[in-house]
Image: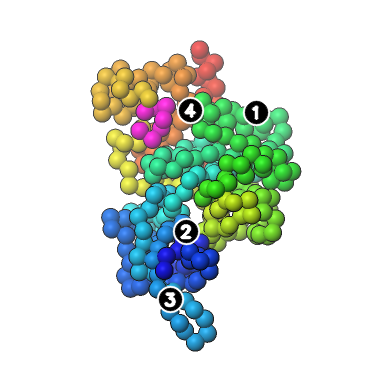
Amino acid sequence: MTGTVYKSTGSWYTVKSEAGDFIECRIKGKFRMKGIKSTNPIAVGDIVDFELEESSDKTTGTIHNIHERKNYIVRKSVNLSHQMHIIASNLDYVFLLITVNNPPTTFNFIDRFLVTAEAYGIETILVFNKIDTLKDDTLDEQLYMQYVYQQIGYKCLRVSAAEGKGIDELKEIMIGKITMFSGHSGVGKSTLVNAMEPSLHLKTKTISEQSMQGQHTTTFAEMYDLSFGAKIIDTPGIKGFGIVDMEKSEISGYFPEFFKLQDQCKFNNCLHKDEPKCAVKEALEKDEISWTRYNSYLKILEGDDEHYRTDDYANERAESDENRNKQ
């Protein structure tokens, strides 16, 4: 039998068969993907072949084959630095939910996510959530962030799950697609899914006032069939997003605005750091490329995975503003 993995809890996988039945399955023996150093051999979204096992109380299954993935998105494993965790596979879009101040989402986090999505061939749409909570200063920040990414070519949406703003446009994009919601804990992923499909009653929690950090409400990634013909994968909140399996020479290729200029650099292996006659750095000095993006690029290039979580968005913005004032 063939089916799609809807939920993974580490040892058991909920698989929806082609007939529409949900069956709890396990892996047969040692099951590892060739060439992928992953902590989880099977991910939500995978197409698998399985055999039914009749036990005394209920029917379970054993997975014996995984179909080739169209794509997948990964992050560095929390405990094993040289391995990765596959978040989900076979996606049409991933929606990265962003909030300006509750909790704050930094440029660096967004850029790390986008670089990984670009590397694995997944189109990302940026969803600025909780726009109903924005005041003058935070509204300016949100619009500035949106401007930076729209200039590059990323599609951006402004939504409020609480007030239902922007929900119809989001649903229109999702019809007939498999999509994933991702972002920090507390950005409103589960609340947004509930706004689109109230019958799901996904658990939600409020932001901790002391730390301004979200609290985990989603424990495992899980796919849901929605009534308007879409499939959504809700994922646990991500605190940090470590880059894995990427050579320094290829990183700039996943920054679309850098990639467009690469052939204009004097050296074809230019890292856009210390090299002379670098088209990217020249565009940066003209403020044609965002300083926040360039700062993210340098941090990824330097492999600064340990400290990026504490990056101060205000400092990044101030540096960009300072450069702009020089012009």
Mark 4 touches mark 1? (CB < 8 Å): no
Mark 3 touches mark 1? (CB < 8 Å): no
Which amino acid does the dot numbered 2 rest on?
A: Val
Can you tell which quarter of the image residue 141 is in?
top right
Residue hosting label 2: 44
Disc on the earlier residue, 4 or 1: 1
Tell me the CA gap for discs 2 and 1.
37 Å
When the figure is inspected, residue 201 is found, relative to residue 325, above or below; the finding is below
In the rendered image, the residue lying farthest to the right is 163
* Mark toward the viewer: 2 or 4: 2
Q: Residues within 10 Å of mark 1 (few under 14, many from 20)?
A: few
Tell me the CA gap for discs 3 and 1.
56 Å
Q: Residues within 10 Å of mark 2 (few under 14, many from 20)?
A: many
Residue hosting label 4: 152
Residue hosting label 1: 140
Q: Is residue 258 magenta?
A: yes
Residue 325 coordinates in the image, percent (x, y): 54, 16
Which residue is rendered at x = 51% and y = 36% of the image?
Answer: 107
Residue 130 is at least partly visible in this image: no
Residue 309 coordinates in the image, percent (x, y): 49, 44
Disc on the earlier residue, 2 or 4: 2
Q: Is residue 180 magenta?
A: no
Which amino acid does the dot numbered 4 rest on?
A: Ile
Tell me the CA gap for discs 2 and 4.
30 Å
